Image (cartoon, grey):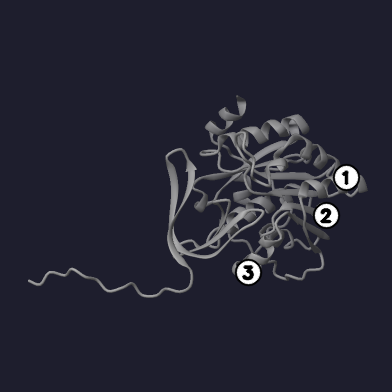
Amino acid sequence: MKREIMAPALKTEGEGVKVLFAEFVNEDYLFGYIGRIIYGESGLQHIYILENKFWGRMLFINNNLQFTSRDEFVYHEALVHIPVQSAPEGFIKRVLICGGGDFGAAREVLKYPFVEEVIIVDIDPRIPKIVEEYFPELLPENPKDPRLKLITEDAYVVVENYLKEGKTFDLVIIDSTDPDIGETTQELSHALFGEQFHKMLKEICPGGIIVQQCGTPFTMKNILVGAYKIFKKVYPDKEIYIYRANVPSFGSDNAFLMRCPFKNPQEPKGLELADTKYYNFDIHRASFSLPNFWKEALET
């Protein structure tokens, strides 16, 4: 019997370097992906796009996964529709998105006809351009919607200026990367999790809703706990709510902190949208049910 020793070369799959890409999730724990790197650049942030046969295209910023083309809708729909539907129908007209240069949150906000203005403030001018080329599905139905404005600037500085100008909003969404943990600070979003930033948000969104993504508590407990402590310092206890959404590519439930001055946000207030893949009114209600280990962590 002839013994096979040599093997033919692999077929050419396309442009980009095929790699095993690992993302450290916690100590001695990582997520691994095999795919082709189709974009890579360092500047304000380290940005990579990996093309994977299961997840599709994956955006990494500073080596942390931000979203995939397969399941980004879960995160963005939870981030937007739960706070919008927590307010009375038609209340939210002016929306500020801090971060969110990928347009995913804006895409969802613009589905509401009563919204009059949506401002995205993202510090990295490359993100919107990258999304337009590699993730067009994240763009709003009408990318040139006159209600939408994009500002490439530090959200902290822009909010400071809005405070001086007296500009106000009905909804503020903090759609940022996760903050740094420890003494070293490299994430541009770090200040957006601070007490001073939220004090300014309270001034420019006096009667509205403020929502902030807080990572996956199962592997990032200190992000939710730390953000919750800031919320408790700035907002009344009765206006603070936590909800969750299971984003498959994140590995576990993502947490969202919400300041909501309206009663019973667990009950949706508007008309149910027809063009969502994740969000519905049953999901809305269930999202506020938290596991006991989350509640215990927040009590410490």
Name the image quarter holding the N terminus.
bottom left
**Label 2 SS:** strand
Q: Position of residue 230 (x, y in %)?
A: 71, 33
Q: Residue furthest right?
A: 165
For the residue carrying disc 2, how many other residues have a C-alpha within 10 Å: few (<14), some (14-19), or many (20+)?
Answer: some
Count the marks: 3
Callout 1 amino acid: Leu
Mark 2, residue position:
94
Residue at the spot of label 1 = 163
Q: Specify which label sits upstream in the sequence, 1 or 2.
A: 2
Q: Is residue 46 visible?
A: yes
Amino acid type assigned to the residue bearing label 3 in the image: Pro
Q: Is residue 115 visible?
A: no
Q: What separation in Å lies between label 1 and label 2 (alpha carbons)?
A: 15 Å
Residue 106 — which label? none
Callout 1 crowding tier (Cα within 10 Å): few <14, some 14–19, many ≥20:
some
The correct choice, above or below, for 93 with respect to 132 in the image is above
How far separated are the C-alphas under marks 1 and 3?
33 Å
